[in-house]
Amino acid sequence: MSRVALVTGADRGLGLALSQALLEAGWVVVAGRHLDWPELDKLAARFQNTLHLVPLDVSSDESVSEAARELAKRVSHIDLLISNAAIHRSHHVERISASLDFNSMMDEINVNAIGALRLTRAFLPLLSNGELKRMCFVSSEAGSIGASLRTGWFGYCMSKAALNMAVKNLSNDLVPKGYSFRLYDPGWMRTYMSGEKNLEALLEPEEAAAKALAHFLDDSVNVEVTLHRWNGDDMPW
Ligand SMILES: NC(=O)c1ccc[n+]([C@@H]2O[C@H](COP(=O)([O-])OP(=O)(O)OC[C@H]3O[C@@H](n4cnc5c(N)ncnc54)[C@H](OP(=O)(O)O)[C@@H]3O)[C@@H](O)[C@H]2O)c1
């Protein structure tokens, strides 16, 4: 049986690099596409038989349900689900002020936290047919309450803390049923979260993807989910 992975936010950045690395390792990849960035088309031309592109907006119930319906026609199972899609609208927010944009914060929470739950609910039947049953959630050090020194970035930090709680509760329920979880901070990457490629950051997305996949596919990781970092450390919740 082919090993099948679903990756959200695969248009660019870490999601694109994860998809490419999995394809090169022989996986069938279902890449969730949001906007039409050209990089994913180039990958699709290289991997015509093993890359499936699926329109997927994790902020929308309809889009996620439709993607799950569409995918069930194409594959019998999913082994590895990677919830990677996220937005960061609050880089410029340094502290409490009149300019806080609560609607924008709700968008961050909808995509980054509730989006992961929508995804899990919709794709659980396909995951239950797979052998590996692994769910990986890309979080951030910004979601650690215990390690936080920030005075702003409210929407992004709150959304990642909420994601962490969702993953903990999911794991309490689903680990006894044979599923395994990874919750992961991929490090500071040269990606597009701030609107343009961040050349000051530490890691190219390809390097970050290799480290992430080593953790996602490591079967010796404890069943108790932790917030694990790219450098091998665990962070406080
Ligand atoms: N960059 C960092 O330094 C850093 C650090 C720690 C954690 N992270 C986490 O790493 C993950 C990947 O981020 P990245 O750095 O690769 O950022 P990125 O380059 O901005 O990529 C984010 C991806 O998410 C997609 N996306 C956004 N809204 C979506 C939606 N509603 N539905 C489906 N897909 C959506 C984007 O698609 P479109 O562009 O088409 O909208 C894009 O493909 C995120 O979870 C992020 O929080 C990043």
Image (cartoon, grey):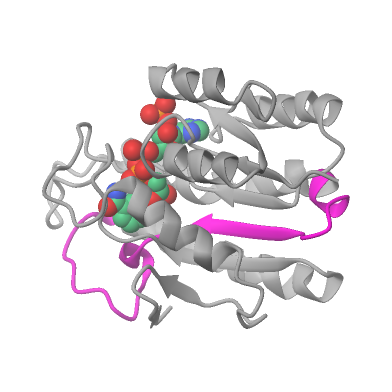
* Number of dots carrying numbers: 0
Apparent side of residue 223 relative to residue 235 in the rendered image (left or right): right
The residue lying toward the viewer, choosing from 142 and 191, is: 191
Q: Nearer the viewer, residue 207 or 197?
A: 207
Looking at the image, is 22 positioned above or below residue 153?
Answer: above
Give how far across and how far down residue 110 sits, in percent.
49, 42
- In magenta stretch: residue 96: no
Q: Nearer the viewer, residue 26 or 55?
A: 26
Vertical relation: 52 (above or below) 106? above
Q: Which quadrant of the figure has residue 72?
A: top right
- Position of the C terminus by quadrant: bottom left
Q: Is residue 81 left or right of residue 91?
A: right
Residue 234 location in percent, x, y? 42, 81
Evaluate whether residue 211 shows in this view.
yes
- Foreground of the two, 204 or 115: 204
Based on the picture, tell me whether residue 138 belongs to the magenta stretch.
yes
Determine whether 93 is above or below 19 in the image. below
* Residue found at x 46% / y 47%: 112
Q: Is residue 181 above or below residue 235?
A: above
- Left or right, 151 with respect to 117, comes to left
192 relative position to 214: left or right: left
Write the residue at 77% across / 23% down: 70
Identified at 33% across, 67% down, the residue is: 141
Figure quadrant of residue 169: bottom right
* Observer able to see residue 37: no
- Ligand 1 shows up in the quarter that is top left
Read off the magenta span. 126-154
Residue 225: percent from left, percent from top: 59, 76
Q: Residue at x 27, y 37 (%)?
A: 192
Residue 36 placement (x, y as % from top left): 44, 16
